[in-house]
Each structure stands twice: as structure tokens, then as C-alpha cells.
């Protein structure tokens, strides 16, 4: 067992809590840096996708997991970032500028979506974000002069002041750099007063208000930051796929993003990464398992949807803390062996109390 | 005259949204859950009716009855197996669960060889008939939808207002613990409500099938029923129908008068306006947030 004896406030809010964490995360960083030379081309591409989805997942985790504002329409911000990048890159803007513009435009869209959030709560917010994502998706389809409509938009490799990032390895390093910076930014945000305000809003809005937290400002800020992260992910996504069309950013993509953070573990930064790994590896696992199943099940077109649905239901029913929660339980078991008791992380049984007045 | 024609088409479409929204409001009134799986339940009901009529060759009324009763039992079983363990959890968890149920339903239907991936027509007895009233040409399929909606909503309203079961359902939605104390069998009621909602969705599916044909992605029509329920107010059964009518009429009129593309987003613009102006919907109750 490890005991952390904290003597100063700064030590309490350190990002790296102890030597063990420094060792393991350093090792992870080294493995990721060496990936282009140790992994095959296919797995490098998958790893790039994991990094891209992690950035988007970080944004959605910040919004839904840490501020408690559930958004069923996050694919719209992904699309805004992707289309901004496509439009500006084809006009010849250098990559850092178009990247920043994608993030800013997505953040502006996030603010627009977040404005009704100040008036509506809970499930109504989810429905409002759903409605927004449909409207934004329709705008993508109809605004043909900018987005190319349903025919889609093509992209070339990102260029910046003379460099052309046209091979997989350099693009992978760009994604890795963006992911690392985004993670550090989010972790830093969460240990700052703003981050704590977000968590306070999630736990109890009225209490947060009585502590002097300006709800409108922080909710809008949360929407803006999470949309900006999704926009960054969208810009990278556009460059990776080299072709984007409006139907890649529909409600199914939004549900995939939510699936990612629910399975990864709501309320933890690790959850975004674990969820992204899950989202990218699940199709591979299904493809591998297809050959083992009888042909009637294995070759059917609806298999992937069914498996996704079953996994989502299983996680919601049996493991609400997600993959990260399961890892926490395993780690606690190993850390305090043999004193682990079965009910340590048990959910409270609660009765339904209506939100309605009468 | 043409406007009237479009209006009637819009009303018929709105009645479909209203029927699905009825099921949504039923579930919300009793368990305060918003079910995103209702479109898929409607699709399953349509497929069940199609299977009875085309594969087994049964007459229309028998198929409809079997489909409705079958879906009702399916709804009860669904509640027992999947929903009951996590009732009482925050709303988001339940929404995720119903989204998962929708995925599984859609995937399973698509997996059925040869039937799941095709679009089918349902050979109903009143297919392709029209009435000529005045100068209007009324589609009998749409008239049947409107009539069924009126009958169903009146029946459900009476159930909730005047019968003991209905009052017990309302009680268990307002304060579950107090309902337990009063001896109301809350769990059994939840199962009953899910069964009832699934049966209503099955009726909607069977009635919709002649108009939009039977295919696996039918459930996405249910996504427009959620704006209908929001517009009407989640806690109100007549509100669901009114909300559905509003959405249907707005959609039909915007399809005709506004440029292309507005038809698809019209329901969502309406729901956004509603959420900003009157968040509780036209007939809904006031919400308060617990500290």
C-alpha cells in the first residue's frame, strides 16, 4: 500500500502524484513515441484514430462527465471543425492557422448551442443538443458552396509554411502532440478553480450558485471548451480520412461518442482514452470473431450494431463506472489485498423522486 | 384547396408522431424516464404485423391484434429484464440504456436473413383506397391513422383520470417511496406501463406501415416523436397528441412553402423555440430542480 503524506497545497494539486505514476506514464509516452517504428502501418493508423477520438472524447468528458451537461449532439462540433479545416485548407491557409480557426469556430458553435442550456435542464438539454445537431447536419448538406453538400469535400495533406505533412509517421506525431497538449490542458483545467466550478455545477447547481459560481458563464465556458476540443479532433479527423461528407456527422456518430465515454468511464480523464481504444478496437474484435461464429450470425449485416447495443446495455447495467471503474476496482483489490470487501464501490439504491412540482 | 390537402396530410403524419409520443409520455408519466427506444419498438411492431400478414397469411385484424399483444408482452419482459435493475438512477443512465436497446433491436432485425434488410409493403385491406369529399382527395390510410389516434388518446386519458390503475401510475411517478408505502405494486405497474407503451407503439407501427413501408430503419421516425412530446409537455397525454399534430402540420407546411431542406429540420427548430419560450411544453407541469 502506498501512503501519500501531503504537506503543502501545491503538493495536493500536483498533476503527477507520486513516483509510480511518473514511471508508468513516462513508459507509456516512450511506447507511443516509438510506435511508428515498432507497429505495423495498419496499427499505426488505428492508433492515430484512437488519438483523434481521445481528443474529442476529452471534450465530451469535460462537458458531460465533469459539468453534468449531457449532449447528444457532439458530432455537430466534430463536423464544424472538419468542414472548417477542409474549407480553409483548400483556400491555402497554413495548417496551424486553419487548425486554430477550426477550434475557434467550433467553440463559437458551442456557445450558440450552450445558450439554451442555461434555461433547460437534464433531459431537455439532451433533446436540445440533439435538435441542434440535426440542424447543423442539414446545414452541412445544403450549404453547397462552402461544404460541397452531399458530395462531400476532399482534403490534401496539411501544409505549414513550406512543410508538407504527407506521410503517416509525421501525421501521427502531430496527432500525438495535439493529444498530449489537450490532455495536459484538461488536467490543468480540472485542478483549477474553473474546473472545480464545473464539478460543482454537476453535483448541485443551486449549491454552486450559492457559493458564488456564475452558472451561465461557466456552463457556456464548458460548452465552448468542449466544442473547441471536438473541433480540433474534427480537423485532424478530416485530414486523416481525406474525405468528409455530412453523413459522417449524424446522430449515429454522436451516439458513438457517447458510447465511448460511457464505456470508458464517465467522470474520469482516463475514461476518454479507454473509450477511444474500445471504440476503435471493437470493430476489429468483431471482425475476428465473425469467423468463429456460425455463418447465420457472423455474416449478418446488423452484427456490429447489435454488439454495440449489447455492450452499452451491459456496461450501464453492470459496470456504471465504465472500464476505468473496473480498473480502479482491480487496482484497489490488489493494493489492499486481502482486505478488499465486495461492496466497496456499490451504487446507492435510490427511489425515484419526481422532479415535477405537483 | 391544396393547402387543405397538405394540412390533412400533415395532420395524419402528426397523428403518427402523436401515437409514438403517447407511448413516450406514458413511460415518462410513470417512471420519469425518456425512452429513446420507442421508434424501434414501433419498428418491431410493424415487422410483427408484417410477419403475421405476409408470412403466416393471417387476416389484417388478427395480425394487428397479435402484433399489439405480442409487443405488449415484449414491453413487459423488457422492463423486467433491463429497465427494472436501474430504475432510480440518474436520467442520463436510463437514456443510454434505451439507446442501447434501440441499437440491439435494430441490429437484430437487420440480422434476420432476407427479411431484415429489405423494404416490405404490408397488404392491408384498405390499401390505396381514397375518398372524394368535396374537392379533397382523402387517403383512407391517413384517415384510419387519425381515427385510431383519437380513439386511443381518449381511452388512455380516461384510463389515467378515472381508473384506479391510472391513478396508481400517476402516484408512483410523483413519489415512488410514498407509493410503496400506500401499497401500490410499483414494480408491477412499471411493467404494465412499459407493456402498454409498447402496445401503443405497435399500433402506430402497423398503422404507419402502409404509408411508409416496413424497413429496419423505420425507428428513426421515432426521433421526431421526441420533439412532439417536448412541444406538448412531457407529463400530459393530450399534450403528446397536440405536440405531434403541431410537428406534423409544421413539417407538411414547411415542406410545401419553404425552400428545400427546411422540411427535415422544421420539427427541431420548433422544439428549440419551444424550449426557449416555454420549456415545459404547452401542457406540461412546472419542473423544479432538487438541491
Image (tube, coloured by chain):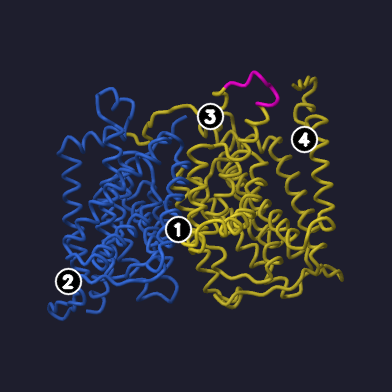
Chain colours: A yellow, B blue
Q: Residue A15 carries which label?
A: 4
Q: Residues within 10 Å of mark 3 (few under 14, many from 20)?
A: few
Q: Do labels 2 and 3 share a chain?
A: no
Q: Picture coordinates of residue B84 (x, y %)?
A: 38, 36
Secondary structure mostly taken by the magenta-highlighted segment of the chain: loop
- Chain where mark 1 sits: B
Q: How far apart are marks 3 and 1 (CA)?
A: 43 Å
Q: Residue B107 carries which label?
A: 1
Which of discs 4 and 2 lies nearer the camera? The answer is 2
Q: Residues within 10 Å of mark 1 (few under 14, many from 20)?
A: many
Q: Is residue A159 above or below residue A315?
A: below
Which of discs 3 and 1 lies nearer the camera? The answer is 1
Q: How far apart are marks 2 and 3 (CA)?
A: 61 Å
Q: Is residue A178 left or right of residue A87?
A: right
Q: In this view, does A210 lie above or below B263?
A: above
Mark 2 — residue? Answer: B125
Q: In this view, does A6 lie to the left or right of B29?
A: right
Q: Is residue B3 above or below residue A193?
A: below
SS label for mark 2: loop
Tell me the residue at 14%/77% (across/down): B131
Which of discs 2 and 3 lies nearer the camera? The answer is 2
Mark earlier in primary sequence (3, 4): 4
Mark 3 — residue? Answer: A207
Q: Picture coordinates of residue B128 (x, y %)?
A: 21, 77
Q: How far apart are marks 3 and 4 (CA)?
A: 27 Å
- Chain where mark 2 sits: B
**Of A104 and B229, which appears nearest the observer?**
B229
Q: Picture coordinates of residue B7 (x, y %)?
A: 26, 71
Q: What stretch is highlighted in magenta?
A: A333-341
SS label for mark 1: helix
Q: In this view, does B210 lie above or below A194?
A: below
Amino acid at each position: 500500500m502506498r501512503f501519500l503524506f501531503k504537506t503543502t497545497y501545491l503538493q495536493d494539486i500536483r498533476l503527477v502524484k507520486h513516483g509510480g505514476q511518473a514511471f508508468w506514464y513516462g513508459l507509456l509516452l516512450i511506447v507511443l513515441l516509438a510506435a511508428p517504428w515498432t507497429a505495423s502501418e495498419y496499427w499505426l493508423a488505428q492508433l492515430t484514430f484512437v488519438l483523434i477520438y481521445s481528443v474529442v472524447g476529452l471534450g465530451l468528458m469535460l462537458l458531460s462527465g465533469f459539468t453534468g451537461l449531457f449532449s447528444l449532439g457532439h458530432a455537430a462540433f466534430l463536423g464544424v471543425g472538419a468542414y472548417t479545416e477542409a474549407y480553409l485548407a483548400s483556400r491555402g491557409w497554413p495548417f496551424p492557422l486553419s487548425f486554430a480557426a477550426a477550434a475557434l469556430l467550433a467553440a463559437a458553435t458551442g456557445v450558440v448551442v450552450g445558450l439554451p442550456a442555461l434555461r433547460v435542464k437534464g433531459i431537455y438539454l439532451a433533446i436540445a443538443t440533439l435538435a441542434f445537431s440535426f440542424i447543423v447536419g442539414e446545414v452541412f448538406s445544403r450549404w453547397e458552396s462552402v461544404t460541397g453538400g452531399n458530395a462531400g469535400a476532399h482534403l490534401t495533406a496539411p501544409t505549414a509554411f513550406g512543410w508538407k505533412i504527407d506521410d503517416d509517421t509525421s501525421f501521427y506525431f502531430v496527432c500525438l502532440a495535439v493529444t498530449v497538449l489537450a490532455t495536459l490542458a484538461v488536467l490543468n483545467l480540472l485542478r483549477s478553480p474553473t474546473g472545480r466550478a464545473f464539478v460543482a455545477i454537476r453535483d448541485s447547481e443551486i449549491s454552486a450558485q450559492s457559493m458564488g459560481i456564475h452558472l451561465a458563464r461557466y456552463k457556456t465556458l464548458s460548452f465552448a471548451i468542449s466544442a473547441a476540443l471536438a473541433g480540433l479532433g474534427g480537423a485532424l479527423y478530416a485530414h486523416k480520412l481525406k474525405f468528409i461528407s455530412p453523413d459522417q456527422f449524424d446522430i449515429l456518430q454522436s451516439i458513438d461518442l457517447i458510447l465511448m465515454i460511457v464505456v470508458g468511464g464517465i467522470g474520469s480523464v482516463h475514461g476518454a482514452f479507454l473509450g477511444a481504444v474500445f471504440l476503435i478496437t471493437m470493430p476489429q474484435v468483431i471482425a475476428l470473431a465473425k469467423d468463429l461464429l456460425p455463418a447465420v450470425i457472423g455474416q449478418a449485416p446488423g452484427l456490429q450494431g447489435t454488439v454495440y447495443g449489447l455492450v452499452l446495455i451491459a456496461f450501464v447495467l453492470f459496470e456504471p463506472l465504465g472500464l476505468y471503474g473496473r480498473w480502479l476496482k482491480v487496482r484497489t483489490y490488489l493494493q489492499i489485498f486481502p482486505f478488499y470487501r465486495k461492496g466497496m464501490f456499490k451504487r446507492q439504491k435510490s427511489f425515484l423522486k419526481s422532479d415535477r412540482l405537483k | 384547396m391544396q393547402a387543405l390537402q397538405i394540412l390533412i396530410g400533415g395532420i395524419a403524419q402528426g397523428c403518427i408522431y402523436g401515437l409514438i409520443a403517447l407511448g413516450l409520455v406514458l413511460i415518462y408519466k410513470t417512471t420519469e424516464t425518456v425512452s429513446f427506444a420507442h421508434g424501434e419498438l414501433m419498428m418491431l411492431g410493424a415487422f410483427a404485423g408484417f410477419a403475421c400478414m405476409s408470412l403466416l397469411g393471417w387476416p389484417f385484424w388478427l395480425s394487428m391484434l397479435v402484433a399489439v399483444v405480442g409487443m405488449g408482452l415484449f414491453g413487459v419482459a423488457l422492463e423486467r429484464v433491463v429497465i427494472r435493475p436501474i430504475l432510480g438512477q440518474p436520467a442520463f443512465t436510463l437514456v443510454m440504456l434505451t439507446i442501447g436497446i434501440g441499437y440491439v433491436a435494430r441490429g437484430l432485425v437487420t440480422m434476420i436473413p432476407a427479411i431484415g434488410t429489405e423494404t416490405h409493403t404490408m397488404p392491408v385491406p384498405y390499401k390505396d383506397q381514397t375518398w372524394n369529399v368535396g374537392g379533397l382527395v382523402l387517403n383512407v390510410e391517413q384517415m384510419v391513422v387519425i381515427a385510431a389516434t383519437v380513439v386511443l388518446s381518449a381511452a388512455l386519458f380516461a384510463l389515467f383520470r378515472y381508473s384506479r390503475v391510472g391513478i396508481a401510475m400517476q402516484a408512483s411517478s410523483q413519489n415512488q417511496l410514498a407509493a410503496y408505502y400506500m401499497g401500490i405494486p410499483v414494480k408491477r405497474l412499471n411493467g404494465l406501463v412499459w407493456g402498454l407503451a409498447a402496445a401503443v407503439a405497435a399500433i402506430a407501427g402497423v398503422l404507419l406501415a402502409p404509408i411508409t413501408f416496413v424497413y429496419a430503419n423505420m425507428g428513426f421516425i421515432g426521433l421526431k416523436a421526441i420533439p412532439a412530446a417536448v412541444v406538448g409537455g412531457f407529463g400530459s397525454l393530450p399534450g403528446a397528441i397536440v405536440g405531434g399534430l403541431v410537428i406534423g402540420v409544421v413539417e407538411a407546411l414547411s415542406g410545401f412553402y419553404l425552400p428545400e431542406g427546411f422540411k427535415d429540420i422544421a420539427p427541431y427548430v420548433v422544439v428549440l423555440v419551444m424550449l426557449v419560450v416555454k420549456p415545459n411544453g404547452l401542457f406540461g407541469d412546472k419542473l423544479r430542480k432538487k438541491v
